[in-house]
Amino acid sequence: MARVQIHVPWQCATCTCSSSRSSSGPTRARYLTVVNAVDAQSGQRVRISKSRNASLAAPAVLFGVPLIGLLGGALGANRLAPFSANDLNTLIGAGVGLAAGFLAAKLIALFRFSGPESLPKAIAILPEPATEGPCDRPSN
Protein backbone atom coordinates (compact mmCIF):
# COMPACT_ATOMS: atom_id res chain seq x y z
CA MET A 1 0.00 0.00 0.00
CA ALA A 2 1.11 3.53 -0.68
CA ARG A 3 -0.23 6.99 -0.03
CA VAL A 4 -0.16 9.03 -3.24
CA GLN A 5 -0.53 12.78 -3.55
CA ILE A 6 -2.90 13.67 -6.36
CA HIS A 7 -1.78 16.49 -8.60
CA VAL A 8 -4.54 19.02 -9.17
CA PRO A 9 -3.74 21.33 -12.12
CA TRP A 10 -3.81 25.04 -11.32
CA GLN A 11 -6.71 25.45 -13.74
CA CYS A 12 -8.80 23.12 -11.56
CA ALA A 13 -7.80 24.93 -8.39
CA THR A 14 -9.02 28.27 -9.76
CA CYS A 15 -12.19 26.99 -11.43
CA THR A 16 -15.45 27.91 -9.71
CA CYS A 17 -16.80 24.40 -10.41
CA SER A 18 -13.96 22.69 -8.53
CA SER A 19 -14.43 21.38 -5.01
CA SER A 20 -10.73 22.00 -4.38
CA ARG A 21 -11.30 25.75 -4.18
CA SER A 22 -12.28 27.50 -1.01
CA SER A 23 -12.97 31.15 -0.28
CA SER A 24 -9.30 31.65 0.62
CA GLY A 25 -7.95 29.87 -2.48
CA PRO A 26 -7.03 26.26 -3.24
CA THR A 27 -7.22 23.78 -0.39
CA ARG A 28 -4.36 21.58 0.72
CA ALA A 29 -3.12 18.59 -1.29
CA ARG A 30 -5.29 15.54 -1.84
CA TYR A 31 -4.09 12.02 -1.03
CA LEU A 32 -5.21 8.58 -2.19
CA THR A 33 -4.33 5.12 -0.86
CA VAL A 34 -3.28 2.78 -3.67
CA VAL A 35 -1.80 -0.68 -4.10
CA ASN A 36 1.90 -0.19 -4.93
CA ALA A 37 2.17 -2.84 -7.68
CA VAL A 38 5.27 -1.25 -9.29
CA ASP A 39 7.31 -0.80 -6.09
CA ALA A 40 7.44 2.97 -6.47
CA GLN A 41 9.56 4.94 -4.04
CA SER A 42 8.73 8.19 -2.30
CA GLY A 43 8.87 11.15 -4.68
CA GLN A 44 8.29 9.15 -7.88
CA ARG A 45 5.35 9.94 -10.16
CA VAL A 46 3.04 7.00 -10.92
CA ARG A 47 0.10 6.23 -13.21
CA ILE A 48 -2.97 5.00 -11.33
CA SER A 49 -5.64 2.59 -12.57
CA LYS A 50 -8.94 2.25 -10.74
CA SER A 51 -10.77 -1.02 -10.15
CA ARG A 52 -13.57 -1.41 -12.69
CA ASN A 53 -15.59 -3.75 -10.46
CA ALA A 54 -15.56 -1.34 -7.55
CA SER A 55 -16.31 1.70 -9.71
CA LEU A 56 -19.41 -0.01 -11.16
CA ALA A 57 -20.74 -1.83 -8.10
CA ALA A 58 -20.11 0.79 -5.40
CA PRO A 59 -22.57 3.42 -6.69
CA ALA A 60 -25.22 0.74 -7.18
CA VAL A 61 -24.79 -0.43 -3.59
CA LEU A 62 -24.49 3.01 -2.03
CA PHE A 63 -27.53 4.45 -3.82
CA GLY A 64 -29.64 1.41 -4.68
CA VAL A 65 -29.72 -0.40 -1.34
CA PRO A 66 -31.02 2.59 0.68
CA LEU A 67 -33.61 3.30 -2.03
CA ILE A 68 -34.83 -0.30 -1.91
CA GLY A 69 -34.92 -0.05 1.89
CA LEU A 70 -36.97 3.16 1.70
CA LEU A 71 -39.52 1.69 -0.70
CA GLY A 72 -39.65 -1.67 1.06
CA GLY A 73 -40.13 -0.06 4.46
CA ALA A 74 -42.90 2.21 3.18
CA LEU A 75 -44.75 -0.65 1.49
CA GLY A 76 -44.23 -3.06 4.38
CA ALA A 77 -45.45 -0.63 7.02
CA ASN A 78 -48.46 0.24 4.88
CA ARG A 79 -49.35 -3.47 4.70
CA LEU A 80 -48.77 -4.12 8.40
CA ALA A 81 -50.56 -0.91 9.46
CA PRO A 82 -49.54 -0.68 13.13
CA PHE A 83 -51.20 2.76 13.39
CA SER A 84 -54.68 3.83 12.32
CA ALA A 85 -53.40 6.54 9.90
CA ASN A 86 -52.02 5.12 6.64
CA ASP A 87 -49.83 8.17 6.00
CA LEU A 88 -48.18 7.80 9.40
CA ASN A 89 -47.56 4.09 8.73
CA THR A 90 -45.95 4.90 5.40
CA LEU A 91 -43.83 7.70 6.80
CA ILE A 92 -42.51 5.69 9.75
CA GLY A 93 -41.95 2.63 7.57
CA ALA A 94 -40.04 4.68 5.00
CA GLY A 95 -37.81 6.17 7.72
CA VAL A 96 -37.08 2.78 9.26
CA GLY A 97 -36.51 1.24 5.83
CA LEU A 98 -34.17 4.05 4.80
CA ALA A 99 -32.16 3.67 8.01
CA ALA A 100 -31.98 -0.10 7.49
CA GLY A 101 -30.94 0.48 3.86
CA PHE A 102 -28.11 2.83 4.90
CA LEU A 103 -26.93 0.31 7.48
CA ALA A 104 -27.06 -2.52 4.93
CA ALA A 105 -25.16 -0.41 2.36
CA LYS A 106 -22.50 0.43 4.95
CA LEU A 107 -22.08 -3.24 5.85
CA ILE A 108 -21.92 -4.29 2.19
CA ALA A 109 -19.34 -1.60 1.46
CA LEU A 110 -17.33 -2.59 4.54
CA PHE A 111 -17.14 -6.26 3.62
CA ARG A 112 -17.22 -6.08 -0.19
CA PHE A 113 -15.13 -3.00 -1.03
CA SER A 114 -12.54 -2.85 1.76
CA GLY A 115 -9.97 -5.24 0.33
CA PRO A 116 -6.97 -4.38 -1.84
CA GLU A 117 -8.72 -5.68 -4.98
CA SER A 118 -11.12 -2.73 -4.72
CA LEU A 119 -8.41 -0.09 -4.31
CA PRO A 120 -6.76 1.77 -7.19
CA LYS A 121 -3.36 0.43 -8.29
CA ALA A 122 -0.14 2.16 -9.23
CA ILE A 123 0.54 0.50 -12.61
CA ALA A 124 3.54 2.43 -13.99
CA ILE A 125 6.28 4.75 -12.85
CA LEU A 126 6.25 7.92 -14.95
CA PRO A 127 9.37 9.79 -16.04
CA GLU A 128 10.21 13.01 -14.27
CA PRO A 129 8.67 16.09 -15.92
CA ALA A 130 10.87 18.48 -17.84
CA THR A 131 12.40 21.09 -15.57
CA GLU A 132 11.59 23.87 -18.03
CA GLY A 133 7.87 24.44 -18.29
CA PRO A 134 6.01 26.79 -20.63
CA CYS A 135 6.06 29.55 -18.00
CA ASP A 136 9.84 29.23 -17.44
CA ARG A 137 10.88 30.11 -20.99
CA PRO A 138 12.55 33.48 -21.42
CA SER A 139 10.51 35.98 -23.40
CA ASN A 140 11.91 37.26 -26.72
Image (tube, rainbow, N blue to C red):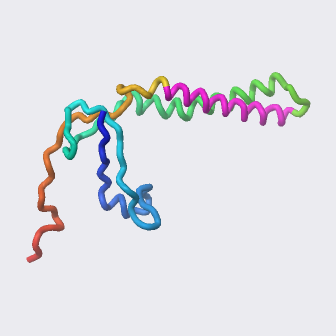
Q: Is residue 39 left or right of residue 82?
A: left
What percent of the width, then of the height, locates residue 89? 82, 31
Q: Residue at x 41, y 56 (%)?
A: 20
Q: Is residue 58 above or below residue 5?
A: above
Numbered disc total: 0
View extreme (right): residue: 84
What percent of the width, then of the height, locates residue 42? 22, 43
Q: Is residue 129 left or right of residue 62?
A: left
Q: Is residue 46 above or below residue 21?
A: above
View extreme (bottom): residue: 140
Q: Is residue 126 above or below residue 101?
A: below
- Work out whether residue 79 or residue 126 is closer to the camera in this orientation and state it: 126
- Determine which quarter of the picture holds residue 18: bottom left
What percent of the width, then of the height, locates residue 32? 35, 42
- Work out whether residue 6 or residue 9 is closer to the camera in this orientation and state it: 6
Q: Is residue 69 left or right of residue 125?
A: right
Which secondary structure dominates the residues rendered in magenta?
A: helix
Q: Residue at x 42, y 60 (%)?
A: 21
The quadrant in which the C terminus is found is: bottom left
Task: Determine if the magenta segment contains residue 101.
Answer: yes
Give the residues in magenta: 86-110
- Work out whether residue 130 or residue 17 is closer to the camera in this orientation and state it: 130
View extreme (left): residue: 140
Q: Is residue 23 left or right of residue 92?
A: left
